[in-house]
Each structure stands twice: as structure tokens, then as C-alpha cells.
Amino acid sequence: MKILLLGCEYTGTTTLAQNIFEWGQNNMGADFGLFHDHWKIPHVTGHWPIDTDSYATDQEQNELINLNPKMKEQMQRHNIYYHIQPGAFKKGEEEKQGFYPDYLAIGMHLEDAVYGPMYFGYGREGQPAPRTILTKTVERALLQYASDFVLVLLKASIETIKKRMRSNPHPHQVIKSSDIEILLQKFEHEFSNSQIRNKFVIDTTSKDKEQTLNEFITKIEPFLSQDDIDRRDQFIKST
């Protein structure tokens, strides 16, 4: 499986990724190894669940926030390009490049196309590496090497996101409460205009994490590759 979760902060992308990780291992024999959730400045280091020691400290996060836009842009662009190299998706050889047979990521180039121009001063039209161009470049490469990628948009109502912000605030959160409406529109735009053809939406407004996972399991089924199905069948037989 190759999955990219997309959504405004507080729509539940990280929680769903953790649950997909465990569901995939326990029900399909999936080998994600880890998932990539490191494109939301200053949370740009480490991987859950095996590399949490590499998460940036508070001091390091502040240093990342204080980088100038030029350095932030280059850091993010190189980070994104590294994660779409051919070796990440070549069947049977993924681990030679430090990747795993199954791929699970959050946000990546599409999240960066929203947050970079809005909050970090880079990626706008007329600036170096405008994200309107970079997203197309990334997806051409991504689909050349992994045409079975599935894009999942998570969304929630404005009031639900505000409530989650109040009840469980993220350290160094990116978004502002006053921006939620436009952010939801921008994420919808990136999702709709993505060249990734395999895609679906989950609205988490009135769902808990179990309900969200169950909807994901139902909606991912048509996009499972034959290899995924064969592996699942073999895993079920062996358990």
C-alpha cells in the first residue's frame, strides 16, 4: 500500500496514520516500518514509531521557526524530493534506500503548498520554486514510480477544528483560528487538482478515531493492488 493522507491541522491525519499503521500490520501483514509526518515546520524530523528520538527539541524547533524563508524553502524542497526517489518504490529493493515495502505519509508536497505560502514566506508565485509548479513536478515523478498511490483528504467543520484546537492544542501549531475557512478551501483545492487519480475524502467532524479508521478501511478497498489483496489473503490464512 502507498498512502498519502492530507488535511488541515486538527482534522486527524496523524491519529489516522497511527491507526492505519497498526491495522495494516495486524490485518494485512503490511510493512510500513514507520510513517512520514515531517513536513509541518517546525516538526520536520523523526518518524513514528521507530525514530522518535530524532524529534526536534523545543530549542531546535524554535531555531527552525527562526530560519529565513529561503532556508525553509530549500529544506522543505529537498526533504520532499528525497521521499519520491525511484528507490523508495522499486518492489523488493525499497530497504536498500532506507524505505519499506509499504509507504504511509502525511501532507508532503501538498501540505507544503498550503503552509509554505501562507505561513512561512516561500513558494508563492514569483518566488523561487513556486509550489504551483513544484507540486506538478513532484507528482509526475511520484506517479512514474508509484502509479498506485492513494490520496486521502481528511476534513472537518470549522467549529470542530476550533474545538479541537482548544481542547488539545499542538505544540508549535501551524494554523491560526482565523484562517480555518480559507485553509479548508486550500486543502480541498490541492486535493481536487492533484494528479493522483486514486483518491477519496473522509469527514471527521462527527467521527471518533475508530469510526474514521473503519471508513478508511471501507474506502481503501477498491484501491488495493493485487499484491495487497494476495498478501492479505496469505496473512489471513497464516493466522
Image (tube, helix red, strand yellow):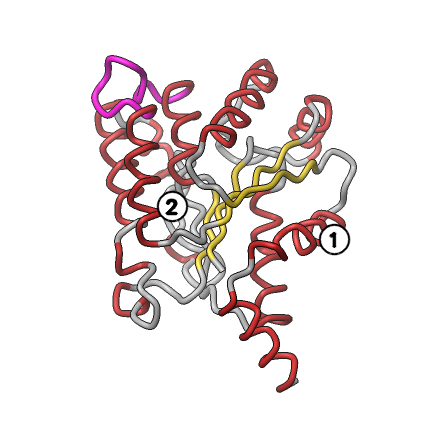
The picture places residue 196, in percent across and down from the top left corner, at 44, 41
Residue type at mark 2 is Ala
Neighbour tally class for label 1: few under 14, some 14-19, many 20 plus, Cα within 10 Å: few
The picture places residue 234, in percent across and down from the top left corner, at 58, 81
Task: Give the quadrant of the C terminus.
Answer: bottom right
The residue located at (71%, 47%) in the rendering is: 212
* Mark toward the start of the polypeptide (1 vs 2): 2
Q: Which mark is residue 192?
A: none
Q: Which mark is residue 210?
A: 1
The picture places residue 75, in percent across and down from the top left corner, at 25, 36
* The residue positioned farthest toward the bottom in the image shown: 238
The residue located at (31%, 40%) in the rendering is: 140
Q: Is residue 149 magenta?
A: no
Magenta span: 119-131
Q: Is residue 124 magenta?
A: yes
Report helix, strand or loop for mark 2.
Answer: loop
Answer above or below: position of 153 versus 161: below
Neighbour tally class for label 2: few under 14, some 14-19, many 20 plus, Cα within 10 Å: some
Question: Could one spot residue 63 in this view of the protein?
Answer: no
Q: Nearer the viewer, residue 104 or 54?
A: 104
Question: Could one spot residue 169 in this view of the protein?
Answer: yes
The picture places residue 162, in percent across and down from the top left corner, at 68, 24
Answer above or below: position of 112 versus 143: above
Residue type at mark 1 is Glu
Q: Nearer the viewer, residue 150 or 97?
A: 150
Q: Nearer the viewer, residue 232 or 29?
A: 232
Report helix, strand or loop for mark 1.
Answer: helix
Q: In the rendered picture of this protein, how many numbered marks are placed on residues?
A: 2
Answer whether labels 1 and 2 touch (C-beta < 8 Å): no
Task: Determine the CA span between mark 1 and mark 2.
Answer: 30 Å
Secondary structure mainly formed by the magenta segment: loop
Q: Which mark is residue 56?
A: 2
